[in-house]
Each structure stands twice: as structure tokens, then as C-alpha cells.
Amino acid sequence: MMIHISTRNGVPIYLQIVQQIRHQIASGRLRPGDELPPIRTLAQQLVINPNTVARAYRELESAGLITSKVGAGSRIAEGVSPLARRERMRILNEVIDGLLAEAHQLNFSDDEVVEALQQRAHGMREPVAEEETDHD
Amino acid sequence: MMIHISTRNGVPIYLQIVQQIRHQIASGRLRPGDELPPIRTLAQQLVINPNTVARAYRELESAGLITSKVGAGSRIAEGVSPLARRERMRILNEVIDGLLAEAHQLNFSDDEVVEALQQRAHGMREPVAEEETDHD
DNA sequence: TCGATTGTATTAAGACTTTAACACAATCGC
DNA sequence: GCGATTGTGTTAAAGTCTTAATACAATCGA
């Protein structure tokens, strides 16, 4: 289970967890019966309060995506199926649109974005620095 | 002044405003001396409370990116210069990395992301639906 | 000069997020 | 069976975000 959270973007932590598990289910990376890490374990990994993870799991259970049993643990619910490629593509396109919008504000053309993505995807991918530079 | 906010992603509204103005300055789209819309006007456009816009402007002024004068208005501060292409590229790469991470969770390969972006950028770009589909 | 405009400031309220510290009950492994 | 593990539930506190309703002072335009 790979979950990565950021506290620098304003998105609530429990929502980041929900969305990432959602997407991993959508992609078939998480399948019915697969175990989720115990609440306390994931909380320790992410260095957040167990209540925050519990909140995320509660939302996922309400959505019918996972089932939780006291003492047992939480698993991907039976019956949930990965999304069709078409649906995943729709989600991907939403994210891409967000990227394009942000790129345009930075005054990059579509072609430049495509080129940058190719560099990033194919070439050696080094992680970028965390900080956003200040102007002046 | 084009600002577009979303209430569906958990990102605080005032932060969305700050970041978008930041990026438009970074790109040279907004230059020193350029007027920002009055707080009340922008608030009306975005259908949010004027206090929220004021919060954004206050942060931008603290950062030295804009200057505000009672009765006059707010303008892009003198002396701020657009970021070098290299810096803008660094920011773009951060966003691209975010896209790739999300795409991977959706089980798309780098090549598929590149292809989807090309479609989106070159082909006819229709806006996607707002809602995220539920599983089941 | 005068009225409208504009940024600033304050106070209040409500909703949401996160952390903290527990207690409890069901399950699992030995 | 027993102890550890695990999800659930509660209460409390602190912080943040947004809206609301004013009031004020400086600036601008006619």
C-alpha cells in the first residue's frame, strides 16, 4: 500500500487517503479481498493521527469500497470492480486539464507541456525540489 | 484577470487565488503596475465573500508581489520580474510529477499519459464532466 | 469639494480538520 | 482461553476557512 500525502497543498489528509485508495481500486491495483493496513499502522507510516486514517476508512466503507471488521481489519469489498478503461481515461483527462490550465497560466504552450512531459516520462526522472520559489 | 476556483478539491479558495496570481506574475502575464480587480469586484465575480479575496491580497502583499492602497486599489508591485524560463519549468515539472503519480495509481503507463495529453492538447478539447464516478 | 470607491480592520458565528486520550468490543494467533 | 490486535466511538481542544455585517480612512473622479 503506497499512500503519499502532502500538507502543503491545503487538501485535507483524509481526502488524500480516500482518493488514492479510490484510484488504486479503480485501476485494479487493489482487488476485492486485499487487505488494507491497520489504521494505527498507516497512521504511524504517514505520521498522522489514527483518527484521521479512521475517518478515511469510514468514508470508504460508507461508499461501499471497503469492509471493516473489529479485530479483523479492513479489506477491499467483494463485488467492487476496477473501472473500465474509458472511465479511468475520463478521470485522467480531468487531471490533464488541470495541468494544462496551470501550465497556461505559467505561459507554457500545449506543445511545451507535451515536450516537458515526454522529458519527464522518458528521460531520467529526478525528483524536483519541494519549495516553490518566491519572486524577488 | 482570469481566476477560476473550484470548491470540490479541498484547496482553500484564498490559496487558489494566491497561487493563480502568483503564476500569472511568474509568467509575465501580469506585470508591475498592472491593476488587480477591486476586492469586492473579484468577490462578486467568484461568488465568494470579499473577506476571502482580501485574505488572498493580504498574503500577496506580505509576499511583496502586490501593493495595495486604500482608495486606490491593488497593483502588481514594482520590481517584481517574471521568473526565468528555467524556474517556470521547475514549477511545471512539479505539476507534471503530480500528474504522473496520479496516472500511475490509475494504472496508466507514462506512454499512455503522453498520448492522452497529446490528444487533449491538439485534438478538439471538450471539457470533461465534473463528477467523479462511483465504483459499483 | 463631495460622493463613490477601495483597502483595512474587527467581531461573530458556523463548519471543518486534526490531534489527543481514552474506553470498548470483536477477532485472531498461539 | 488469553493476550494482542483491530475497528469503533466519545469527548475535548486548538486551529483554519468562510461567511456576515459593519465601520473607518484614504483615494479618486466629477
Image (cartoon, coloured by chain):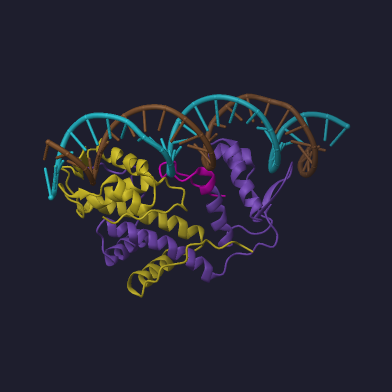
Chain colours: A purple, B yellow, C brown, D cyan
Q: Is residue A12 magenta?
A: yes
Visible residue check, residue B50: yes
* Residue depicted at 33% across the width and 56% down the height: A102
Q: Is residue A121 above or below residue B52?
A: below
Q: Is residue B32 left or right of residue A106?
A: left
Instruction: Name the one closer to the observer, B19 or A96.
Output: B19
Image quadrant where residue B64 sits: top left
Instruction: Name the one closer to the observer, B41 or A66.
Output: B41
Q: Is residue D25 above or below residue D19?
A: above
Task: Pick the quarter of the image with the C terminus of chain B.
Answer: bottom right
Main secondary-structure element of the magenta-colored stretch: loop
Visible residue check, residue B83: no
- Residue extending farthest bottom: B123
* Residue depicted at 57% across the width and 56% down the height: A22
Residue A94 in picture, x, y percent from top left: 44, 63
Q: Which residues are magenta?
A: A1-16
Q: Is residue B55 left or right of residue A12?
A: left
Task: Pick the quarter of the image with the N terminus of chain B.
Answer: bottom left
Residue D19 in picture, x, y percent from top left: 43, 44
Residue B85 in picture, x, y percent from top left: 21, 54
Instruction: Name the one closer to the observer, B66 or B51.
Output: B51
Q: Is residue B78 magenta?
A: no
Q: Is residue B30 left or right of residue A122?
A: left
